[in-house]
Amino acid sequence: MEPEDTLPELIAHAKAGSHDAFEKIYRTHVGRIYGVCLRILGDRSRAEEVTQQVFIKSWLKLGSFRGESSFGSWLHRMAVNTILNELKTSKLMHLRSQSLDDFSTESVPQQRLSAEVQIDLDRAIAALPLGARVVFVLHEIEGLSHKDIADNLGLANGTCKAQLSRARKLLREALKRP
């Protein structure tokens, strides 16, 4: 294995059992996976645990990756599914909203917003009640459909839409400038 191996070569080496190749894959993708876990779960330690779960699952299921989509998309989908399963099984939907102090913006992708606006938006998202935050992040940031979110969370489609509407309303209120 050469230091400049491409992702397809790394995947092939990892499928053949190379831990070094998988470590390079991990280092390439861990930030994005941790970011989505943190945005949805809103807790650093849970996000770290779920991120680890995702990479353990990806190592175990690497042989099933056929390359029909990009590896990043395959891994991201696995992450979202793992997070949704975590939400269902641990009943996080009933826990308190996270404190703003626990939220980190370090891995939230920066868009074409000013730094100040981005920080305000990140904090406003973090302050949403968990149900509204989950639906908002999955729909608006991760691009899942209402149906996919509702099916995965065991909600009615209308409940999913209502949570998204609630999240948007709360975000508008939180982002109003005095």
Image (cartoon, rainbow, N blue to C red):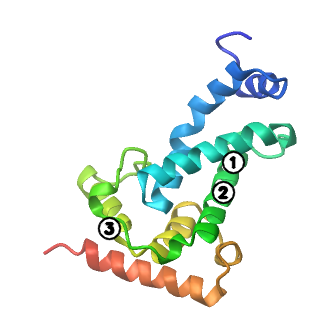
In this view, the residue farthest toward the bottom is 158
* Residue position marked by numbered label 2 in the rendering: 82
- Residue 23, image x and y in percent? 64, 25
Crowding at dot 1, Cα within 10 Å, few <14 / some 14-19 / many 20+, comes out as few
Q: Which mark is residue 62?
A: none
- Nearest to the observer: residue 63 or residue 46: 46
Q: Quadrant of residue 89?
A: bottom right
- Going by the numbered disc 1, the residue's amino acid type is Ser
Crowding at dot 2, Cα within 10 Å, few <14 / some 14-19 / many 20+, comes out as some
Q: Is residue 14 above or below residue 151?
A: above
- Going by the numbered disc 2, the residue's amino acid type is Thr
Mark 2 vs 1, N-terminal side:
1
* Residue position marked by numbered label 1 in the rendering: 73
Q: Residue at x 61, y 90 (%)?
A: 158
- In the rendered view, does 75 fall on the left or right side of 83? right
Q: Is residue 120 above or below residue 128?
A: above
- In the rendered view, does 125 fall on the left or right side of 48? left
- In the rendered view, does 97 fall on the left or right side of 40? left
Badge 2 element:
helix
* Residue position marked by numbered label 3 in the rendering: 124
